[in-house]
């Protein structure tokens, strides 16, 4: 399976759990990853994160753990001691057990910016545990949630103005998520149209 079939895109961030090892130190963190023009992968890692320090100080490889399990994403931020690691096949950084797919990568280059480093990855091995494995991205779910809010708003606008206004604010948040998580103009346009229609509905 290639990277695009797995869900990676040049325009929309794929949300993965990134694992990295530096000597005896291991860390896991949710990260957004993009395909680049060379067919490899890249991501931004911001200052103040443990992953940032590990890469700056010489970490050489990583694993992109692909899952849609919200508990694993939660643990990667709040309860790192609960993450079940096991060895990767081609790199020193570990995999996380029970994910849908894994991309083991070599860190080929980093570019330093004011608040973050841009990290470039060369995939060494793609392993899927499920034929239908796909990376998670926030843009599609955010549009669906915005549409659900919009249908509720149409019902509530003449019954409970306060709840309708609250739903409109939620739709704006979902629109912002779409803009933050993808460069795809079609998806951005859809999210903006939902917000505009919700604003029109509340005003009438």
Image: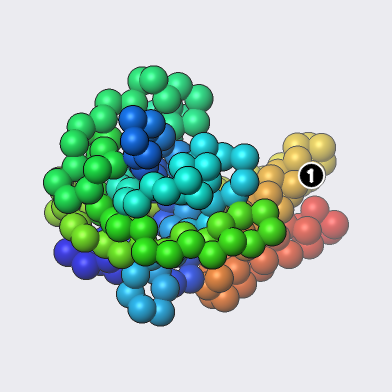
Q: Give the number of callouts.
A: 1
Q: Which residue appears at 68% of the width and 49% of the height?
A: 173
Q: Hey, which quadrant is residue 167 in on the image?
A: top right
104 or 166: nearer the viewer? 104
44 in relation to 71, above or below: below
Point out the image quarter for the N terminus: bottom left
Q: Hey, which quadrant is residue 49 in on the image?
A: top right
- Can residue 153 be seen here? no
The residue carrying pointer 1 sits among few (fewer than 14), some (14 to 19) or many (20 or more) residues within 10 Å by Cα, namely some
Q: What residue is disc 1 on?
A: 165
Q: Is residue 77 left or right of residue 85?
A: right
- Can residue 124 be seen here? yes
91 or 18: nearer the viewer? 91
Q: Position of residue 177 (x, y in %)?
A: 61, 54
Q: Position of residue 161 (x, y in %)?
A: 82, 41
Q: Position of residue 139 (x, y in %)?
A: 51, 58
* Colour scheme: rainbow
Q: Which residue appears at 61% of the width and 55% of the height?
A: 116
Q: Is residue 191 left or right of residue 26?
A: right
Q: Position of residue 30 (x, y in %)?
A: 46, 42
Q: Element type at marker 1? A: helix
Q: Which residue appears at 26% of the width and 54% of the height?
A: 103
26 or 2: nearer the viewer? 26
Q: Is residue 88 left or right of residue 62?
A: left
79 in relation to 29, above or below: above
Q: Which residue appears at 42% of the width and 73% of the height?
A: 36
161 in relation to 109, above or below: above
162 or 133: nearer the viewer? 133
């Amino acid at each position: 399976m290639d990277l695009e079939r797995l869900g990676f895109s040049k325009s929309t961030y794929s949300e993965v759990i990134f694992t990295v090892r530096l000597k005896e130190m291991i860390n896991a963190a949710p990260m957004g990853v993009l395909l680049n023009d060379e067919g490899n992968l890249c991501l931004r890692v911001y200052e103040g994160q443990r992953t940032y320090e590990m890469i700056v100080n010489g970490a050489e490889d990583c694993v992109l753990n692909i899952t849609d399990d919200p508990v694993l994403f939660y643990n990667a931020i709040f309860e790192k001691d609960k993450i079940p690691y096991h060895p990767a096949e081609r790199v020193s950084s570990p995999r996380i057990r029970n994910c849908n797919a894994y991309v083991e990568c070599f860190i080929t280059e980093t570019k330093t910016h004011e608040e973050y480093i841009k990290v470039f990855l060369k995939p060494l091995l793609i392993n899927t545990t499920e034929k239908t494995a796909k990376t998670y991205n926030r843009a599609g779910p955010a549009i669906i949630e915005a549409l659900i809010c919009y249908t509720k708003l149409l019902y509530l606008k003449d019954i409970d103005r306060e709840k309708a206004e609250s739903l409109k604010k939620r739709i704006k948040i979902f629109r912002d998520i779409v803009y933050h998580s993808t460069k795809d103009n079609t998806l951005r346009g859809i999210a903006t149209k939902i917000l505009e229609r919700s604003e029109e509905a509340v005003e009438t």
